[in-house]
Structure formats: C-alpha cells, structure tokens
Amino acid sequence: MKLLSSPASPFGRKVKMAILMKNLKDKVEITTVDATKGDATLSAANPMGRIPVLVAENGQVIHDSQVICEYLDTVGTGPALFPANGPARWDTLTRASLADGIIEAALLMVYEGRYRPENMKVQSWLDRQASKIHTSLAMIDKAPPTWAAAPDYGHLTLAAALGYLDFRHPGIWRDKYPKLVAWLDTFAKTVPAFEASKPPAA
Ligand SMILES: N[C@@H](CCC(=O)N[C@@H](CS)C(=O)NCC(=O)O)C(=O)O
C-alpha cells in the first residue's frame, strides 16, 4: 500500500497511528506530498487535493482519514479500531467527529495566518475557531473517554487533535484542561504509535 501524507498533517497522523496500531508498518510505503502547493499525483488521486490518501494493494484509492482508518482496520491485525455496530460504534464515531472538528478549527486558524495578507486577517473568524476548540475541549475534559481493552478510532483521533494543538497552537490548552493532559499522557504510554508519528518540531 502507498500513503500520500506529510509529516505535519494531523489527519495523516491519525492514519500513521492506525498503520502502527494495526501492525501494518511493513505493508505501507509513505510518500510525502505538499498539499499546500498543488501536487499532480495528489490531485489525480483526490481531486480535493487533500492528504491523506491511501492507495490499496489492489490499486484502489481511498480517502479521507476516517475511511482509510476503517479500511486499515479490516486488513490489519490487533484490537479493532471501529466497533462493528450498535451504540459503541456511534459513540466511537461521534467522539472522532468532535476531535476531527477540533483539528479542522485548528487548521483553519493556521490557514488564516498562512494565506491571508496581514491587513486582511479577520480576528473575529480566528476567535470563532478558537472558541469552538475551547467549547469542545471543556466538554471532553469533564470526562475524558476511557477504554476497556484498547484505545479505538475515537481515542486516536482525540490524541491527534491534542497533538496538533501542541504542534501549531502551543500554550492554548494544557493549563486549562488538566484531565486531558493526563489523558494524553496515558494514551501516549499505551500507544507507542503516538510518539512514533509525532511531527518534526514546528
Ligand atoms: N476530512 C479530511 C481532511 C483532510 C485535510 O484537510 N487535510 C489537509 C492537511 S492536514 C489538507 O490536505 N489541506 C490542503 C487543502 O485543503 O487544500 C480527512 O479527514 O482526511
């Protein structure tokens, strides 16, 4: 299999964690793609021009990060990342959806800084994204999601979100959400893939 991603991508990090958690390291070749510049290989695989994209062994192109993780769950070994059905499945997917929302808001803040000329930056837009992040973190911090046998897709997505905040917005969450800080420490100790997929220093 081939994965198109980049070292800094939080959505790519979700997939990299899933690859390691499902014991597929030797089966996936990772190619670095710069999604911010427009890349012909990437556009051919995903017309949205977004990473991550997985090309399966049979040549099938799979995106986005959730679909890739679900695919990897079917071809790898180890504990299931996605409960097959019932309330547990909707709980996992809903926790992941909220964590993806945190990543999206954090990414929009990065893009605002990166792409808009200084005199066109809209502070109220940045504040709105930051507020979404804080409202979500405050809710999750009340009762960080535990796991029984092993962390699932919802947990790995939350870890990717917190890792991305550390990477791109350091200082905005750790002093406010102590339970989440402890939760991420426990996750990192339980899942070596978290540290192994860490982006290079910003
Ligand atoms: N929903 C997608 C989001 C992917 C995404 O936004 N990736 C970012 C990099 S982390 C990207 O490719 N951005 C470039 C762009 O949107 O043009 C997923 O879960 O994979």
Image (cartoon, grey):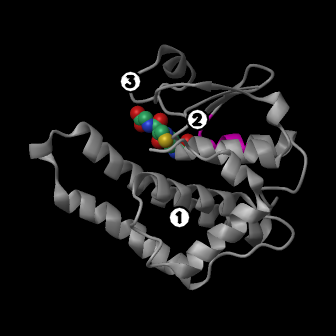
Characterize the local packing of mark 3: few (<14), some (14-19) or many (20 or more) Cα atoms within 10 angstroms. Answer: few
Which segment is the magenta one?
Answer: 63-70
The residue indicated by pointer 2 is 52
Q: Are marks 1 and 3 in contact (CB under 8 Å)?
A: no
Mark 1 residue type: Leu
Q: Position of residue 168 (x, y in %)?
A: 42, 52
The first of marks 2 and 3 along the sequence is 3
Q: Which residue is mark 1?
A: 98
The x, y position of residue 22, in whole percent, is: 83, 46
Circles 1 and 2, Cβ within 8 Å, touching? The answer is no
The CA span between labels 2 and 3 is 15 Å
Disc 1 from disc 3: Cα separation: 28 Å
Q: Is residue 92 visible?
A: yes
Residue 92 falls within the magenta-colored stretch: no
Q: Which residue is mark 3?
A: 37
Residue 150 placement (x, y as % from top left): 83, 65
Q: Which of pointers 1 and 2 indicates the residue nearer the eye?
A: 2
Assess disc 1: are there few (<14), some (14-19) or many (≥20) residues with their C-alpha within 10 Å of its C-alpha.
some
Quadrant of the image for the C terminus? top left
> As drawn, which residue projects farthest toward the bottom?
142
In this view, the residue in front, 199 or 89, is 199
Q: Is residue 12 above or below residue 172?
A: above
| Circle number at residue 31 | none
- Which amino acid does the dot numbered 3 rest on? Lys
The quadrant of the image that shows the N terminus is top right
Q: Nearer the viewer, residue 135 or 17?
A: 17
Q: Earlier in the sequence, mark 1 or mark 3?
A: 3
Q: Residue at x 52, y 41 (%)?
A: 9
| Circle 2: residue type | Pro
At 80% from the left and 36% from the top, the residue drawn is: 25
Side (left or right) of 137 relative to 180: left
Which is the main secondary structure of the residues drawn in magenta? helix
